[in-house]
Image (cartoon, coloured by chain):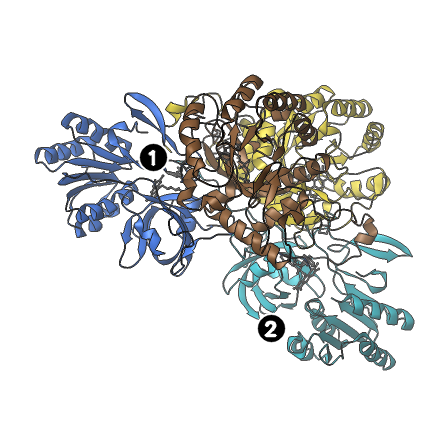
Chain colours: A blue, B cyan, C yellow, D brown
Amino acid sequence: MSFEPSDKYTDSALRIGDTDPYPQRLVGEFIGTVVSNDWVNPEYKHLILKVHPHALKAYAGQMFHLLCPSPDGAEVWMRRPMSVYRVDRTEGQVEFLYKTEGRGTRGMAKLGPGDDFNIAGPLGHGFKLEPGWKNIVVLGRGVGLATLAPLSQLAAEHGVGVTAILSARNPDVVMSKELFEELGAKTITVVDTDNSSAVENVETILEDLIAKGKADAFFTCGSNRLLKLMQRLGEKHHVPGQVAMEQIMVCGFGACYVCMRTFKVDGKLTLKRVCRDGPVFNMQEAVGW
Amino acid sequence: MSFEPSDKYTDSALRIGDTDPYPQRLVGEFIGTVVSNDWVNPEYKHLILKVHPHALKAYAGQMFHLLCPSPDGAEVWMRRPMSVYRVDRTEGQVEFLYKTEGRGTRGMAKLGPGDDFNIAGPLGHGFKLEPGWKNIVVLGRGVGLATLAPLSQLAAEHGVGVTAILSARNPDVVMSKELFEELGAKTITVVDTDNSSAVENVETILEDLIAKGKADAFFTCGSNRLLKLMQRLGEKHHVPGQVAMEQIMVCGFGACYVCMRTFKVDGKLTLKRVCRDGPVFNMQEAVGW
Amino acid sequence: MVDLSVKIGAITLQNPVQPASGAFSWEYNDVIDLNRLGALVAKTICREPRLGNPTPRMAETEAGIIQSIGLPGKGIEYFLDHIVPEYAKFKPPLVVSVNAETIEDFAALAEELSVPDVDVIEANISCPTRNQTGGNFAMHEDYTRDCIRAIRAKTTKPLWVKLSPNAGDIVSIAKAAEEAGADCLVIANTFLSLKIRTDNFRPALGNKFGGLVSPALKPIVLRMVYQVAKAVKIPIIGIGGVTKAEDVVEYMLAGATAVGIGYAGFRNPTALITIIDDLEAWCNERGIKKVTELIGAVRDDDMEMDTLVAASAGV
Amino acid sequence: MVDLSVKIGAITLQNPVQPASGAFSWEYNDVIDLNRLGALVAKTICREPRLGNPTPRMAETEAGIIQSIGLPGKGIEYFLDHIVPEYAKFKPPLVVSVNAETIEDFAALAEELSVPDVDVIEANISCPTRNQTGGNFAMHEDYTRDCIRAIRAKTTKPLWVKLSPNAGDIVSIAKAAEEAGADCLVIANTFLSLKIRTDNFRPALGNKFGGLVSPALKPIVLRMVYQVAKAVKIPIIGIGGVTKAEDVVEYMLAGATAVGIGYAGFRNPTALITIIDDLEAWCNERGIKKVTELIGAVRDDDMEMDTLVAASAGV
Ligand SMILES: Cc1cc2nc3c(=O)[nH]c(=O)nc-3n(C[C@H](O)[C@H](O)[C@H](O)COP(=O)(O)OP(=O)(O)OC[C@H]3O[C@@H](n4cnc5c(N)ncnc54)[C@H](O)[C@@H]3O)c2cc1C
Ligand SMILES: Cc1cc2nc3c(=O)[nH]c(=O)nc-3n(C[C@H](O)[C@H](O)[C@H](O)COP(=O)(O)OP(=O)(O)OC[C@H]3O[C@@H](n4cnc5c(N)ncnc54)[C@H](O)[C@@H]3O)c2cc1C
Ligand SMILES: Cc1cc2nc3c(=O)[nH]c(=O)nc-3n(C[C@H](O)[C@H](O)[C@H](O)COP(=O)(O)O)c2cc1C
Ligand SMILES: Cc1cc2nc3c(=O)[nH]c(=O)nc-3n(C[C@H](O)[C@H](O)[C@H](O)COP(=O)(O)O)c2cc1C
Ligand code: FES
Ligand code: FES
């Protein structure tokens, strides 16, 4: 009889309740338990995961690297990066809002309550609120809103006012509106269907917010068009800004140099690692895509 | 946006209700639906699969080649051969009795009612009852009984009497007794716990059956010790016999020459393909293992 | 309607999908309609009857199998008398794979196999399980040239040459084969491999070494096909890890004219038929009228080579 | 208690598990205790600052990934001033991987890197993404010999040489490296590969070719380690597809003294720690007191070579 070696990939991931043999770690590999994983619209799902308390250090703009289950019997070979959508410290939960795209996210979409889910993180540098900022403007579209959403939480904790401009194809697929409003943010929805999402209209809205003193800083993610707009207005009116970037990743730790993006630093083009130097960057340095 | 090719392995397998584009085929690739998959004892499970009617051509001693699901997230790369345990033509079902061993059978053990299961077959040459045989003796142990069990069905259909000697470690893990008895076979259970399964005792039983004219042919599977015994007695008393053999397989169709076993044909040692020249062979030709 | 036919020299295949040698026999007609295949490819035949290698001949690995069969068979006489007639019942061209220890015997065998019912001679000069160093003549440019030249001199049948992925410089070997008169290159055979059992410290295969077969290897073989296609004029058949229609497309984009399939047919005995059907559907969806449009159609001539520019493009 | 320590020349590793170059940095201390590793292995360093290859630098394949990074880095000065001190904070020996275009520069770089905090120089003569033919010096026996000899002349640090799995005859290349003064062979780097997207007919990587990384490849690399171990006297580090403790055992049985790990650490950032723990448990269960007992302990000397006898044995 043949001896069958342990055929599962090994992991020392922390489960809820585990004592951590390396408590000084900043980043963990965690096996959480799925609480729920529901559709919020035909393309996006919202996953709530109960996790080891160390995972709750995550803050807005940081990401986790997710070991997605298989959608089809064949393995998914690489982790997938995903912004933390919300951290619920009382319930011990982290949440993700994600679009089902390729194999990884389709596998993730199959997770159900009670399932294990292996996530590594929190990784990278998230959004930072500078002292003195009283009102910020958040502008996002599509999946970018998943990344920006926890800014509402961060801002609420710091007593900073938020105006969130949510752009979407149509009113049915606007996301995170409730989450922003629940935490006291003012939201403005712009959609393609009535053309309100056009750059010119968003520009008017932004100019208005700047004029009203509601824009001490800009935050964006998910649309190159909107990034360019904010960069232009930010430069014009000296509004500092932060942008969360995306790139294909392997390690998530800054080691592999796979996740490079181009930035302009001191007038010179250079590469930075999205996973470790970001994913949140100085908005004016971003070259866009 | 990247185009994601169909990421599931293709198959033209026949589902229940499909019309077959190649109806003259002898062997099919089928996607059946699991009806049940229950433990019969701590090591063995019994799987009932509803299948396309073409799969019901299977008879005793033939096998299917099973595409086992993953037990652990990583793929199972090769099919696993398994004897058909029972064919229920009225219900349109084939059944398997299997021992959970390695990754393939452990994956199989995870199947639940309603799941798809891809099987190819029926493959190989099964047991044959010669005209003139009135009473046969079936002797098996362990997983070999899964292979021998449908002989009860075949014999019943041909009005042939069966004495089934079922060998097991202890009375609790004797299998197929009910199935044999249901179809009119006489069963004799021999177990290790009271030493009744010892070769000497089984030999006495066999000699007795021969003497009583109950042994027109011998059938065995699953134990080399018992094979040798039947070969010896068969030679002595001129009782013809058939043995079902096992070997690791790849194709199941006779093409790859992976599943070779040694046989003695006309006094000369030679190799035969278990999948296509067998799995059932002339008992006297088998060299054993 | 898509025209799926491709030409390999004088031979026309009704579609670019064929089985790989050793992973197929006429007995598959039990499960699929062999008349739908691009070609029929027989198991490699040697002159003398051979038992082949000690069992176990297959072991599962992390992602695939290693196998070492050792070219068993009943010898050329039986082959010509009993096996060729079985294949002759079907319409697609019959490709006969051949292997021998010496160049002389290779050529002589090819000659003897050049009977009317045989359409193509495939010289398997790359069986990794015939010796322990990773294959035969296809490991060396000069041996390849000599062997193919000798065969070429003895047969007028189309001559396909199966190369080894274990060779370091497959482009030079491919060029040597072309120069020596090959009509087509079959890329590639299996990767010489080893598995050791950690329970009993023994090699998992009776023959110790075996050839690795796995869809995981497709990117390596695809690279070889791409490199060779840029260097030779004769057609190429890509073999390695094809499991779906998109893989056929990928090999053709890289420069292959057709593909051979082993593993996928083991996994799904009806796979070749599905792949042919899917390939037709794939072409249809994209308005591709002739599958030959795909051959070498990879868009590699306008790649962004500036790293800073590339890293400012979308994901 | 199991003694997990192994010796590679003058260097003692507390256990045979180390990261692979390019798949690791001191930044992993965020997630695992680096002091538990057998060695720390820095990303390959070149003399000048380099941006590396155009993105995308990674694409998933059927079973694994292809990647083409292009050895980006901030150059040797920054490396010595800022990165070596980061590694120096930890106890395990520091292995510094180095690459250069010319033999002269290779040797000069190795010399400059021979500072006290660097314990080992690893000559990465096998990066498949630096040119399009499958690697550098490690594709050729003579280049390997010349390069290693030149480096050997310029440094007294232990010199490890990373070989290429794309070479056809890795045994000769390994022997050349040994002859030229290598203290250890690292087998192997990645497999030169290609993926073409079937949606836009373009190579999936910005650099076109990339190195395939996959647990599926372990049997190929294991075969190379086994063959080389029979041919050289210096220790070998096996790299390729290690994802669990049994893989470490398998490489050691084949003749490796230690292993390097890339992919598994990407998949599970804590994998190296689990593998070390599991390896100890595995040895404990089997009463293995010193892990070095496993080195080369494959039972390959009493294999059944008679096919008829073998095929009458149990499954
Ligand atoms: C820092 C960061 C935060 C992110 N946060 C979220 C989030 O909160 N919600 C969400 O839905 N998505 C988020 N993404 C994008 C997410 O990582 C990708 O959608 C996911 O990896 C796609 O995996 P897949 O297997 O489903 O698709 P694949 O089949 O791998 O690819 C499908 C498409 O997604 C693109 N893609 C693949 N990987 C990435 C990637 N790493 N980044 C961006 N695009 C990619 C591909 O180019 C392709 O167009 C984030 C990405 C990054 C880098
Ligand atoms: C014609 C035939 C009929 C069979 N009928 C049955 C049956 O009805 N019920 C049943 O439980 N089993 C049957 N088997 C055995 C069954 O195929 C194996 O138990 C199964 O393949 C093991 O797969 P695994 O992945 O669970 O184990 P693995 O991890 O692959 O192996 C576990 C053990 O099983 C042995 N094994 C692996 N493959 C085979 C094989 N093809 N044949 C025999 N032993 C093997 C291995 O050597 C090892 O000792 C039959 C085998 C053959 C050839
Ligand atoms: C069991 C088995 C037997 C094989 N026998 C032969 C052979 O006789 N001649 C040959 O040229 N190739 C042989 N091969 C190699 C295949 O033809 C093919 O090159 C290889 O399987 C890779 O293709 P795949 O990835 O589609 O399986 C064999 C492969 C397998 C798996
Ligand atoms: C993203 C990435 C970057 C790599 N960079 C290097 C490198 O800089 N130098 C090197 O010698 N090998 C490099 N390699 C190869 C690895 O060191 C290792 O040989 C390979 O990944 C195989 O091991 P694995 O199967 O455990 O991943 C790299 C591999 C990957 C995946
Ligand atoms: S993903 Fe590895 S450096 Fe960013
Ligand atoms: S399994 Fe292929 S010949 Fe029997």
Ligand 2 in which quarter: bottom right
Q: Position of residue C132 (x, y in %)?
A: 75, 37
Per the image, the residue denoted by label 1 is: A277
Q: In the rendered structure, which amino acid carries the disc numbered 2?
A: Asn
Q: Residue at x 49, y 49 (%)?
A: D273
Q: In the rendered structure, which amino acid carries the disc numbered 1?
A: Asp
Q: Dot 2, how many residues are within 10 Å of its Cα: few (below 14), some (14-19), or many (20+)?
A: few
Identify the secondary structure beneath mark 1: loop
The residue at the far left in this view is A212
Q: Relative to A101, does residue D137 appear above or below in the rendering? A: above
- Say which chain tag 1 marks: A
Which residue is at the front of the view, B156 or A88? A88
> In the picture, which quadrant includes the C terminus of chain C?
top left
Tell whether C16 sits left or right of A241: right
Q: Residue at x 79, y 74 (%)?
A: B137
Identify the secondary structure beneath mark 2: loop
Per the image, the residue denoted by label 2 is: B41
Q: Residue at x 20, y 48 (%)?
A: A180
Mark 1, mark 2: which one is toward the viewer? 1
